[in-house]
Image (cartoon, rainbow, N blue to C red):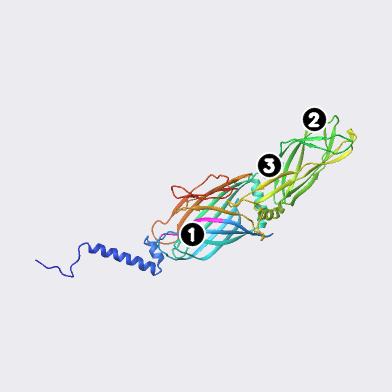
Amino acid sequence: MRVPSELDPIPGGTDRGLSTVRTVLVVLLVLGGSVGGAFALGVVGAPSVGGVENRFGEVTNETTVIESDLTVRNPNPIGVDLGGVTVDYGVSMNGIAMANGTKEGVSVGAGNTSVPFTTELDNSKIPAWWVSHVRNGEHTELRVDAKATSSTLGRSYSTQVSRDIDTSVIEAFRTDEPKPLNASSPIVSDPVLILERTEAEWGTVNDERTEIGMTLYLHNPKQYPIVVSEIGYDIHMNDVTMGSGEAAKTTTIAPGETVAVEATTAIRTQRLDEWWVSHLRRNQVTDLRMPFYLVIDLSNGGGGEQRIELDSYQRTVETDVFGTKPAGDGAGSDGSADGAGSDGSADGDGDESDGSDSDDGTATDTPTGTDTSDGGSGDDSTTGTASSTPTATPTATPTSTPDGTETDDGLF
């Protein structure tokens, strides 16, 4: 019988040897900095954009700072340094580019890395956005695009959050509550007219004027005809005078009759950038006021011509552009907007969701994530989509669902 030699192969040793070689190779690749090679072997996972959180920063007459935190996820259990990551970021509203920026040389370690950066929104673009918003039925699609690219891996991951923002500013000019109009004159008794209701619709909207076609239904409770010779108005949004004017149109209202009196009011579109600054500095809250006056002829009742002031139309318009904000009014002493927002969070496949609504509008987020490869081997493309229906809550609280997707509910 032959005695085994030290040179004889050990049973199963070939497989174990190859396994050991592979392990050593992977370790050498990683420790040696060849992350691209390890990724090509399928050992190192690709980074992804895990979420984007935005808030308004300092607001000046010219610019609005958007402060963002982009979460980049590195799925690798070991601390592989994915140096050379470039982040591109952009915000658009109804297809109008509002802000964009790039940050280079971002270092991403294992796990989640928060990448802070800022972009500036040019306030002079607000009037153009407003025109698109009104023409679109007071609807805006807010899109936040973010892409992280690793030069080491030759791979990029993109995510996009689409947020629908709806307002009802036109409602501030409508009322169905009857209001008595008093002359406060010792010669005639009050009320001299009754404003039964008003209707309003958007008219011509362009870079100069945003017209509002109003119809006032005036009732004459007197036994004699009353002549309306002039209607005047002012429009204020957070103490910024947005428009004023008068219309000299003679209308006679017979005794006991109700007559529809039409008037066209207008907002000066180019002043909307001033309003935007005030809106953000007050935590995205606007107090809209529109005082009216009528000039009427009470000669048939012995009172002569009288100017009657109407109670101001008032409405509070509140928004939350990025999805969530803290409760309360006002801003910090540094002039920055006291509001923060989350544009969604993503799971490992790039799925995201976030939603919110408000007293005068609703908003939903529909995010998408796309993973693309600029190099490497194999099928390196994955996509993910998700949507959410919002609920009105003061702040967004992420909750974990069974499939690992995070959802945010917020107040718009």
From the image, tell me which residue sits under label 1: 72
Residue 76, image x and y in percent?
41, 60
Looking at the image, residue 68 lies above or below residue 353 = below
Left or right, 2 with respect to 345, comes to left
Residue 58, image x and y in percent?
64, 60
Distance between the alpha carbons at the discs numbered 3 and 1: 42 Å
Q: Does dot 3 land on a helix, a strand or a loop?
A: helix
Looking at the image, residue 115 lies above or below residue 236 = below
From the image, tell me which residue sits under label 2: 257
Task: Specify the amino acid type for callout 2.
Answer: Glu
Q: Residues within 10 Å of mark 2 (few under 14, many from 20)?
A: few
Q: Residue at x 46, y 56 (%)?
A: 371
The quadrant the N terminus occupies is: bottom left
Task: Specify the amino acid type for callout 3.
Answer: Glu
Distance between the alpha carbons at the discs numbered 2 and 3: 26 Å
3 or 1: tag closer to the N-terminus: 1
1 or 2: tag closer to the N-terminus: 1
Q: Residue at x 73, y 41 (%)?
A: 213
2 or 3: tag closer to the N-terminus: 3
Q: Residue at x 70, y 55 (%)?
A: 274
Highlighted range, magenta:
45-53
- For the stretch drawn in magenta, the main secondary structure is strand
From the image, tell me which residue sits under label 3: 171
Task: Specify the amino acid type for callout 1.
Answer: Val
| Pick the front one: 66 or 133 | 66
Can you tell which of label 1 and label 2 is closer to the viewer? 1
| Pick the front one: 340 or 147 | 340
Please tell me whether residue 367 belongs to the stretch shown in magenta: no
Quarter of the view holding residue 22 = bottom left
Q: Residues within 10 Å of mark 1 (few under 14, many from 20)?
A: many
